[in-house]
Amino acid sequence: MKLESVINKIIQHKKQPNLRYQLKEKVEEFTNRLFYTLFDIDTPVEENLKQLEKDFDALVNLACWEVKKPCKKVWDNYVEKLPRILEKLNIDAEATVECDPASLSIEEVYMAYPGFYAIAIYRLAHELYNTGFPLVPRLMTEYAHRQTGVDINPGATIGDAFHIDHGTGIVIGETAIIKNHVKIYQGVTLGGLYVAKNLQKTKRHPTIEDNVTIYANATILGGNTIIGQNSIIGGNAWITASVPENSTVYHTPEIKIKTLPNV
């Protein structure tokens, strides 16, 4: 096959007119600059906000495919929300210091805890998601997912003082609701009980009430599933129905004792 024929066939099968991977790269640059603007003491806030506005304009040009939709108006509203987002993230960091005996300082949480980083990018993405500009926040949280192993959909609703310990393998679905002072450990899934496209507009993921702790590798599924406040979900638990408040749920392993050696 001649090279010209190969080129033509590749062009023929490139069917997505809006698929520009530079958008993904620019979202990552935007996300990094935004994180530094909020947290790094040596990063000038005013200067960076001006650059972020330019970065955001570039994202709009790449990702706002509906020309009648006023995407450019999103930035001004978003900037006004940044102080409140930072305030919430400071509360999250303080919750981690209080929860984790391994934390040596709050600076360590900001710089070294993958769970905090994933929460930070989620909170920054969630406000954009709420404006109806979904692709950029999705790319933001996917960037954090790649960095940390924590997959939080930007559509999830998460309250104050949220703590993720270790983090690797956590999945939090789009319609999940997590209230205040919740602690989640590695490998936890807050997922859908069924996977079907016609469920797109329905609540598919569980609700976690205040002061709940969910230990490693627990799986909680279903939009009607509610974990009552002050409950503890033990490691490896599989839950598809609601749990009353003040409950403790454990996965009980089966233990078999060998009666003969080497059997």
Image (tube, rainbow, N blue to C red):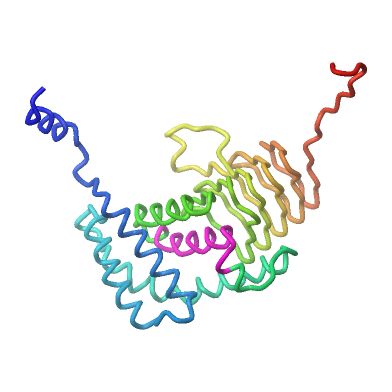
Picture layout, residue 252 above or below residue 24? above
Residue 124 to residue 144: above or below: below
Question: Which residue occupies the extreme right position in the image?
Answer: 259
Residue 185's spot in the image, x, y percent?
67, 51
At 12% from the left and 33% from the top, the residue drawn is 7
Q: In this view, does 201 lie to the left or right of 173?
A: left
**In the depicted view, which residue is nearer to us: 232 or 167?**
167
Percent coordinates x, y for residue 26 in the rendering: 30, 59
Residue 210 at what x, y percent from top left?
69, 59
Q: In this view, does 138 lie to the left or right of 192?
A: left
Question: Residue shown at 18%/32% (left/top)?
Answer: 13
Q: Which of 191 and 27 is in front in this view?
A: 27
Q: Which span is picked out in magenta? A: 110-129
How many numbered badges does the structure rendering display? 0
Residue 174 vs residue 48, the one in the foreground = 48
Residue 120 lies in the magenta-colored region: yes
Tell me, yes or no, whether the highlighted magenta stretch contains residue 3.
no
Residue 201 position in % (x across, y down):
44, 43
Q: In the picture, which quadrant includes the N terminus?
A: top left
Main SS category, magenta section: helix
